[in-house]
Image (cartoon, rainbow, N blue to C red):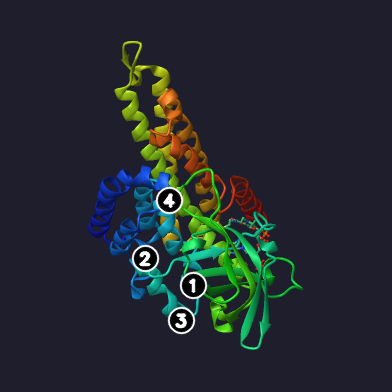
Amino acid sequence: MIRDPAILQQLIDTLARFVRNRLMPAEAQVAEEDDIPGDIVEEMKAMGLFGLTIPEEYGGLGLTMEEEALVAMELGRTSPAFRSILGTNNGIGSASIVFDGTEEQKAKYLSRYASGELIGSFCLTEPDVGSDAASVRTSARKQGDHYVLNGTKRFITNATRAGTFTVMARTNPEIKGARGVSAFIVDADTAGITVGPKDKKMGQAGSHTADVIFEDVRVPAAHLIGGKEGEGFITSMKVLDRGRLHIAAVSVGVSERLIEDALQYAVDRKQFGKPIAEHQMIQAMLADSKTESYAAKCMVLDAARQRDEGVNITTEASCCKLFATEMVGRVADRAVQIHGGAGYMSEYAVERFYRDVRLFRLYEGTSQIQQLVIARNMIKAIQD
Ligand code: COS
């Protein structure tokens, strides 16, 4: 749902200019230094980009899912690291509170996420808990008016910059599965928290992940999200439904950038006496990329509109994430192929994007987890 087309267009035009004039020229520097320049982060804050999805009453822009998808596509046109630094505040790092937090929790944290004063980080994955997310081992033992958290979280995006962690921990060791898990907001400066060194990754330089270790971390009971034990896994799944659609939208944006770069190169580069864009085998790669990117865009916008209408889109979000992230992998591969040997050189952005997009098929649920969610829901639907 688009609330006011003129206002949204203004936001998208401003963002497009920022991406083109400010972020794209800084891509190589970010890749080289594995960090995002502080002045760019400050500009992002001033533009309200940390609060895109935070409700307006807490100082955010309160974007609908369709609006968020269109904005994510625009942000996707530059290095994913730029989106990543503001991605957790607009998604997994704040959504648990937006969806299920108490009024007090919302009042305490949401406006600070919206302004970018606090970076929110989401802690679900553990060394032995990946796809089987309901098997969380981190424990939260109730002690008076506090919970005591112990455990290790792994590959945590923005951990090194975080002001808060949304932590999934087992409050009931008797219940082994989903219903034993609760969600907590944990201030990053609480005693007993250690953030490990940033992980060395294949791509997405400038976006940081790290381990977060909790050793007897005392968290006030008032920080149990929603004030109810046993709801943490369900909250996570709701957060991931939205997150998966967001990643699909980003994948569409990246594919559009890659197609633009590959097309430009194909028009400029001459072989056998003419631009390679005039060779039919290059044209086939361009056409397949355009077709698949367009298909993913249609899927994402359709699912986003349905979500805005209140429809349960768990299946559609997984369809979008599966298709769009696999699609951008193929598009990146073709973009490198169209560039030939030059595509293997870091001088061209396609080399970097080829590595960057590999993550989209892994985080917020692998492609195989999306297939599992889709098929399970299909089977359930005929049994109900
Ligand atoms: N929305 C709301 N509730 C949901 C839900 C959703 N999308 N998906 C599952 N649930 C609920 C179920 O209804 C069930 O509730 P009840 O206890 O009331 O029956 C509960 O959650 C457990 O669901 P389920 O039995 O399906 O859980 P599984 O252990 O089988 O796990 C998968 C389901 C595999 C889909 C889940 O573990 C998953 O998404 N794994 C991938 C994790 C991931 O994406 N990690 C990335 C880390 S974050 S970057």
- 228 w.r.t. 151: above or below: below
Q: Secondary structure beneath disc 1?
A: helix
Q: Is residue 364 left or right of residue 148?
A: left
Q: Name the residue rendered at 65%, 78% in the picture.
A: 148
Q: Earlier in the sequence, mark 3 or mark 2?
A: 2
- Residue 375 picture location, percent across and down: 63, 48
Q: Quadrant of ligand 1?
A: bottom right
* Horizontal and vertical percent position of residue 232: 60, 70
The residue mark sitting in front, 3 or 2, is 2
Specify which label sits upstream in the sequence, 4 or 3.
4
Q: Secondary structure at mark 3?
A: helix
Residue type at tag 4 = Ala
Q: Quadrant of the N terminus?
A: bottom left
Q: Is mark 4 within 8 Å of ligand 1?
A: no
Residue 10 in picture, x, y percent from top left: 23, 56
- Residue that numbered label 3 is attached to: 103
Which residue position holds label 2? 51
CA–CA distance in space, label 1 to label 4: 24 Å
Q: Position of residue 92 (x, y in %)?
A: 50, 62
Residue 221 left/right relative to 257: right
Mark 1 and mark 3: Cα distance apart in space? 9 Å
Quarter holding residue 2: bottom left
